[in-house]
Image: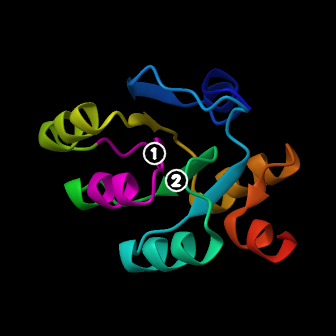
Amino acid sequence: MKREELGGLLSATVLLDSGYEPEGGYDTVCACDMMSELLASMNQTGQNSRGVLLLTNMTNPQVVRTSEMVDIRLVIFLRGKKPAPETIALARSCGISIMTTPHTMFSSCGILHAEKLQDVQTYNRDV
């Protein structure tokens, strides 16, 4: 799924467009607030360079640093949260797009699941 489609489904606002779009679009969702859990999940799946997006309530620069480590290139902040300017600047330098949606994590996951996007853990079991 293309970033623009995701934005429409989630009523999201683009805060930063890195210009990057995976060849096959985004097809996998990681919904997580603990960055240690994000690292553990992504290291187990071996999904680097895939179309994985992150849904999170956390808006600090660590989200961007961790996303960069596991090759996530789209972060969507939940409940209308907007990151500080330093977080946006870091995302710009890392080539990571940032969006914000008014939806909760539960609602966002439900919307994306209905559109057949995969859960990061489901993908791991299917391999």
The span from disc 2 to disc 1 (Cα, nearest Å) is 5 Å
Label 2 with label 1: CB-CB less than 8 Å: yes
Q: Nearer the viewer, residue 119 or 124?
A: 124
Q: Quadrant of the N terminus?
A: top right
Amino acid type of the residue tagged 1 in the rendering: Val
Q: Residue 62, percent across and down?
A: 24, 61
Q: Nearer the viewer, residue 115 or 12?
A: 115
Q: Quadrant of the C terminus?
A: bottom right
Q: Quadrant of residue 30?
A: bottom right
Residue 112's tag is none
Q: Is residue 80 magenta?
A: yes
Q: Nearer the viewer, residue 44 or 60?
A: 44
Amino acid type of the residue tagged 2 in the rendering: Leu
Q: Residue 51, percent across and down?
A: 63, 43
Q: Residue 66, percent across and down?
A: 33, 61
Q: Eyeballing the image, is 124 above or below 92?
A: below
> Is residue 106 toward the left or the right of residue 14 in the image?
right
Q: Residue 69, percent across and down?
A: 36, 59
For the point 81% across and 53% down, which residue is it?
A: 113
Disc 1 residue crowd, few under 14, some 14–19, many 20+, Cα 10 Å:
many
Q: Eyeballing the image, is 112 above or below 85?
A: below
Start-end of magenta stretch: 63-82
Q: Is residue 76 magenta?
A: yes
Q: Eyeballing the image, is 123 above or below 22?
A: below
Q: Secondary structure at mark 2?
A: strand
Disc 2 residue crowd, few under 14, some 14–19, many 20+, Cα 10 Å:
many
For the point 51% across and 68% down, which residue is it?
A: 32
First-in-chain label (2 vs 1): 2
Residue at the extreme left of the image, as rendered: 86
> Is residue 15 toward the left or the right of residue 99 in the image?
left
Q: Which residue is denoted by mark 2 in the rendering?
A: 54
Residue 75's tag is 1
